[in-house]
Each structure stands twice: as structure tokens, then as C-alpha cells.
Amino acid sequence: MQPIISIKNLSKTYDTGHHALKDVNLDIQKGEILALLGPNGAGKTTLISIICGLVAPTGGSVTVDGYDIISDYRETRKRIGLVPQELAIAAFDKVFETVQYSRGLFGKKPDNAYLEQLLSDLSLSDKLTSELRALSGGMKRRVLIAKALSHEPRVLFLDEPTAGVDVELRKDMWKIVNRLREAGVTIILTTHYIEEAEAIADRVGVISGGELLLVDDKNNLMQKLGKKQLLIELKEPAQAIPESLAGYALALSKKGSEIIYTYDITSDGTGITALLQAMAEAGLTMKDLKTSQSSLEDIFVNLVNPQ
Amino acid sequence: MINFQAIKVIYHHEMMRAWNTLFQTIASPVLSTSLYFVVFGSAIGSRIEDIGGVSYGAFIVPGLMMLSLLTQSVANASFGIFFPKFSGTVYEIMSAPISSLEILIGFVGAAASKSLIIGIIILITANFFVDIHIMHPFWMATFLILTCISFSLLGFIIGLWATNFEKLQVVPLLVITPLVFLGGTFYSIDMLPPFWQNVSLFNPVLYLVSGFRWSFFEVSDVNVYVSLAMILVFLSVCLGIVWWMFKTGYRLKQ
Ligand SMILES: Nc1ncnc2c1ncn2[C@@H]1O[C@H](COP(=O)(O)OP(=O)(O)O)[C@@H](O)[C@H]1O
Ligand SMILES: [Mg+2]
């Protein structure tokens, strides 16, 4: 299937000389939710801004639905909705009017029924005639989402959608994202919250220092880079790890009442069976077993600061 | 394909700003025109002899209109594009499927329309004070419209260029206002010493006021075709600058 967005050798050097993007290559599939994960200053906003037409690339190319973002900008832009990172609003405009305005800017004929539904989905029905400056930060963000969706885009960019947003709005946001996904909208969101990527993305791209370090299916990524830990609770605390178990990567915790075994799920055998046997031989009886998997956060830290 | 919807909403959005402050939009030109008439037209004008057979009160009408058209066009257009830059909402325009020309038509069209309306309000107000007979209505309309468009373009350029409110105001204050006052708004340059007459010829506003006044009374400082040529040159220069600004993404795109 042809990707909805195809980024080839994209680079950007700002006038300041700062190299914000370095040879980025990325294909985004129709209907997927892609999270771009990276620390502040990684180049996430720059990448999005180029695709949306706010920043001129200094190298490489991007196509959206097969159209080039520069030579066919009308075709690419009408397919795209953008919710920017900053809360940029025209303070004196009214909610419904500003959404009508956005729809018109993107060349769509007025459709108040659609816009009313959209605003109601975003819990803004009772604010239609409010001035934007009178809204809370969370409400303003909802308006920005409504503006971005006003022209029924096929691709939605959410730049740090939940930064500084309360829990309720964050949950609503995820609901909205899910509903859009069901409608077949492709969603690219940037975040530096790993839980967010973990919770809603299908694929995760890790970006740092202007480089796309990797892109992978979220589950693959976890598997590929994830370490698992086996937590063995002992019936009776051990003073030390017995000599016979020295070959395993073990650690003792909670005053000897737990043994932690760290293993790599990518290696051939996990060695769990052998370990349990060796433990029994060493006279350790276990009370309980638990496994835990490293979160994207751990993976991310490993990637960005390789040992 | 032209994005008519986009032009429409930008134009409408800009016009709504004036509509929302309708009282101010109408009251300020009416008030200032009335004041000028009381002070210059009646108090001072009664002691000034006719110029080229036109009473001083009537003589200053075209100049007064130009004064307002120029300052209003520049103020409206510069603020119109500066504000989205300042508030950050310009991101939406920049990411929309809209060409530079369409953006320009929306913003400059609205600013020019507003000045045009103000010009007409002034003309109507002036009519209460003096009898005005327009000898060449077609020429008058041409000058009126070309002036509104050119100076709205100039305002648009200033709005793109300005990075803060101070810069936004400094050009109108330090350049436009002096040029208008020294451009024969309230006098004929015949009244000046020869040296200053020659200096005045370097003032583009002089040609506007002169041509505009000619369309009212057939009284002018320079030939009407020269006036027309000058305003067309000015218009082309502004268009050229805007074209260059858009082409390079000047202060809009990094
Ligand atoms: N307009 C600009 N001019 C110069 N440097 C910029 C500009 N915008 C961003 N940068 C720099 O580019 C880098 C990437 O920024 P950005 O894309 O905003 O990162 P992120 O969104 O991942 O936090 C940062 O170091 C930032 O300082
Ligand atoms: Mg950012």
C-alpha cells in the first residue's frame, strides 16, 4: 500500500546554522497512529512544520498522498490538519466563527451541521458564542483541535497535544484520537511523555538531535529492546545469592526476600527453567513469581544515552 | 484553481473587526472631519482667499479624504497581518491550501474596502459643511480606489516587516503623516517658496492629492496624468516588494 506520507532524506538547517533535522526518512501508513517521541529540541516540531508548510526544508522531499508538499501544496495541505504546540488563538474571535473561518481557509464550503457536531464531540456545544479569550487553557486546546478538524482532514498532526493538559482532557484527547482512528484518519503526534506513546500509538518513532533513531511497531519495539525481569519472592529471606547461582544476572532485594532475574527476551533461551531448578537445588523455596517488562521509558533512555 | 472560500473568510474576518467596533469605525472619521472643518474650514478658512476659484473649505476636502485614506489604509492593513503574526495564529494561514496572492487579496482587499467606506463617510460629512461638486466622478473613483489599494499594500508590507508594536506605529507616524501634511493637503504648493515647491515634487503624496483634487475642481499642482502615473508606479513598487517578501517567506517562514 502506498504510504500516506513519505519523507525522504529530509533535512533542515535554520538560519542560525542549527541543524535541526538530519536526513530523516520515514513512511507513514494510512490510518495508523504514529508517535514521535523525543526530548525537547529533538526536532519534532520542525519535522511537523515542514510537512504542514510552516518551515521550508533545506534538503530532501515529502509527499502526502503522492503529492509533493511544495509543488502540490494545495493538494497536500487540504488533506492535513494541524494542532500546534503553542496555544495560538485570536483572542477576540468566537468559537463557532473561528471554526467556520478555519474550514473556509482550507477551501471547504460552509457546513454548519458538521461543525456543530464536531464542536459537540469536543464538549464545546455550550461555548459556541464565547470569545476565545474567555476560555480556559483546556478549552482553548479543544478549539484548536476543532479548527484542525474543521475541514475533515485525512491526516492529523498533534504537536504535544497533552503537554500541560489536565487528566480529564488528556483522557478525552485519547478518546478523540481513537474515534478518529476508527474513521480512518492518520494521526501523527509528538510527545515526550512515553506513557502517551505507549498508550495510543501503533508505531513509535524515536527522534533525538534531529535524527530519527528508529521507527518500529510499538510491540516490536518493546520486544526488541525490552528487558524482562523475573521477580522471585522467597519463602525465607536469603543472606546472599548462593555460589551455584553466580552464573545468572541476579540481584537480591527487600532484605533478601526477593530475587530479581533480568533477562533479554531477544536472546535464544531465557534460562528460567534452569534457574528455577538451580534455585531448588540451592535450597531456596519460592513463594511467588512475577514478571515485568521494561517500559518505553527505559527503552528510550537506553536509546538516547547508549552505554 | 483559486481558493475562493479562503479569500472570502479572510476578507470577512477582517471586515468583522471593523463591524465589531462599528461606532469607532464611523465616529472617528466623522468627528475628525468635522473638527478639521470647524478649525480650518470655518475659523481659518474664512480668512484665506479662494484658491484657483475654489473656496478654502471645499479646497481641503480632497486633501482631508486623502489624509484619512492613507492613514487608515496603512493602519488597517498593517494591523490586519501583524496581529496574526503577533498572536501566532498566522500558522493556520501558512498551513492552509492558499496562495500568497489569495492571502494578499483577502487582507489588502478588506483594508482597502474599509478605507473606501471611510472615504465616502468623510465625503458625506464634508457635504454638510461645504457644497461639493465633483467634476470628474470617474477620475475621482479611480484615484480613490487606487489610493486605497496602494496604501493598503504599503500597510501590508509594514505589517509583515514589523516585529513589534513600536515598529508597526513608527512608519505611519514618522513617514506617512509628515508626507501627507507636506503633500499639499491643506494648501496649494504655489503658496510655498520656489525651493520648497521643488522639494515637494519629491513627495509622492503630492501627486495623489493633486490628482484627486483635480477630479473635484480641475485645480491641480501637477498634470493629472502625471498623478495617475505616479500612483501606478507606487502600486507596482509595493506589489514588487510584497511579491519578493512572499517569495522569500520573509518573516513568515523559517
Ligand atoms: N526558528 C528557529 N530558528 C532557529 N532554531 C530553531 C528554530 N526553531 C527551532 N529551532 C531549534 O531547532 C531545534 C529543534 O526544535 P524543535 O523542532 O522545536 O524541537 P522539539 O519540537 O522536538 O522540541 C531546537 O534546538 C531549536 O532550538
Ligand atoms: Mg516541539
Image (cartoon, coloured by chain):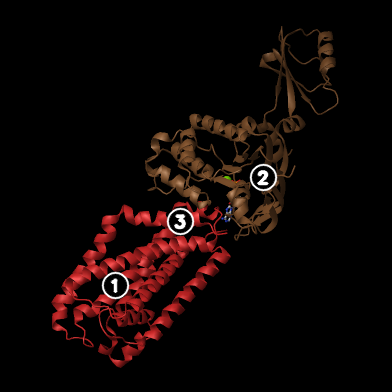
Distance, label 2 to label 3, CA atoms, is 42 Å
* CB of mark 2 near ligand 1 (< 8 Å): no
Front position in the image: B162 or A259? B162
| Up-down relation of residue B164 to residue B232 (above or below) | above
Is mark 1 in CB contact (under 8 Å) with mark 3? no
| Up-down relation of residue A36 to residue A66 (above or below) | above
Dot 2 lies on which element? strand
Is mark 2 in CB contact (under 8 Å) with mark 3? no
Give the chain of mark 2.
A
* Mark earlier in primary sequence (1, 3): 3
Residue B14 picture location, percent across and down: 40, 56
- Labelled disc at residue B5: none
Three-letter amino acid code of the residue under disc 3: Lys
Of the chain colours in the picture, the one used for chain B is red
Residue B57 picture location, percent across and down: 19, 78
Give the chain of mark 3.
B
Q: Nearer the viewer, mark 2 or mark 3?
A: 3
Task: Check if mark 1 and mark 3 are on a common chain.
Answer: yes
Of the chain colours in the picture, the one used for chain A is brown
Front position in the image: A110 or A46? A110
Front position in the image: A144 or B143? B143
Does residue A243 appear in the picture of this structure?
A: no
Check disc 3: other Cα within 10 Å, few if <14, some if 14-19, many if 20+: some
Front position in the image: A1 or B37? A1
- Labelled disc at residue B65: 1
| Residue pointed to by mark 2 | A208
| Residue pointed to by mark 3 | B8
